[in-house]
Image (tube, grey):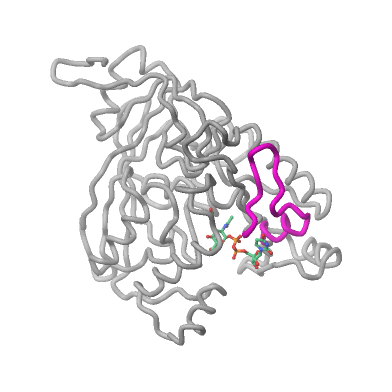
Amino acid sequence: MYRSGDNVAMLVQNNVPLQAYNSFHIVAKAQALVRIASAQDVLDVLAAPHLAALPKFVLGGGSNIVLTGDVKSLVLKVETMGRRLVGEDARSYVVEAGAGENWHSFVSWTLTQGWPGLENMALIPGTVGGAPVQNIGAYGVELQDRFESLDAIDLQTGRVFTLKAAQCGFAYRDSVFKHDSAADLQMGHQAIGLRARALILRVRFALPKIWRPEVGYADLQRSMLTENCPEPSAQQIFEWVCAIRRSKLPDPAHIGNVGSFFKNPTVSPEQCVDIIARDPTVVHYPLPDGTIKLAAGWLIDACGWRGKSVGQAGVYTHQALVLVNRGSVDGPDGATGGEVMTLARAIQTSVYERFGIMLEPEPVVV
Ligand code: EPU
């Protein structure tokens, strides 16, 4: 126990097993971990000179990370809780949730409160605080479509600040929270990177008062047809999305995984013509900006990866875009981060050699 002040006791845990805290269930330890239940807990960390000086790693639900070894940075495990209606206007209910809240439970709760809008993103693993980091999305709705603002705390100064959507740099599975400032400068992008710099405390969502179902996705169209339900309720869509996900994606409670391992790439129409010439069955979707999105799962599948393994890291049999841990979720026999990354690189190489496309990993490699 480290005491940082007269009334404040902050627990720093050492050598904390992280297997239960990452959805790949990779065995690794945090050399030091502090649970963050409020902004005050961060201020206590910053007030302790030996902790303040350490590099920090913010851990949410661990559903979008690959641990490649023990974590030497100070792990700040986000456990800020609470959910409530904080405002409304003619168009929206503004609903706030603590970053440590479970995402799916939050989605489910908003529906029971009569505030639809998040149902297409049901059953995405992880926490509310992780959702803006990678701008989660599924079945035609992305977090940025429902985002109002968030509060975060600066891990250098302890200052709490609010960001609106335009300040979060949302893009497909991307945000300022995934980038370091320096790396961004090198890449010639915006210089504001908040990775390891900010900890998200709470997120607010604008949920539409005039709700319309988002059922453009082929899987949802099929559900509407087979169930003969042309005007589904939000609860109905929620249930369809849960059923579709359960049929395609492994449940991380039983099989370690981080969902889609690569982003779906976009190509120019010329590149797409070239790829169609190589394989006319390639799954592709034209985007409004004229580019074309390809299904990374299809590309990986076409290279014969489905069901293949490197050590205990494997390609999921029902969805080639998902890499899985073939070991148990709580035993020592599972995949290492090294095996996962070796498999990922082998997949990248073979897709590149066959289609000329370099797939970009979705999770953060730690
Ligand atoms: N496909 C194959 N073989 C495979 C996998 C997919 O041919 O092994 C084909 C499918 O038949 C389909 C197409 O590829 O025609 C796309 O597959 P799917 O509908 O399963 O969606 P996805 O593009 O693989 C994306 C998101 C998912 C999200 C779903 C639904 C990314 C990287 N992934 O997957 O998000 O749930 O759409 O919206 O954008 C996640 O990010 O972790 C995630 C699960």
- Please say if 298 is above or below 169: below
Q: Which percent across, then down, holds residue 361?
A: 62, 45
Q: Quadrant of ligand 1?
A: bottom right
Across and down, in percent, residue 302 comes to 76, 59
Quadrant housing residue 105: bottom left
Is 345 left or right of 151, judged from the image as shown? right
Q: Considering the image in quadrants, where does the C terminus appear?
A: top right
**Is 304 colored magenta in this rendering?**
yes
Front residue of 113/258: it is 258
Magenta range is: 295-318
The residue closer to the viewer here, 76 or 288, is 76
Q: Position of residue 243 (x, y in %)?
A: 46, 67
Residue sitting farthest toward the left: 7
**Which residue is located at x 18 percent, y 21 percent?**
8
- For image coordinates 40% across by 39% down, the residue present is 60
Does the magenta portion include 343? no
- Please state the horizontal and vertical placement of residue 235, each as a whole percent of the image: 34, 72
Q: In this view, does 61 lie above or below 6?
A: below
Which of the 4 quarters of the picture holds residue 3? top left
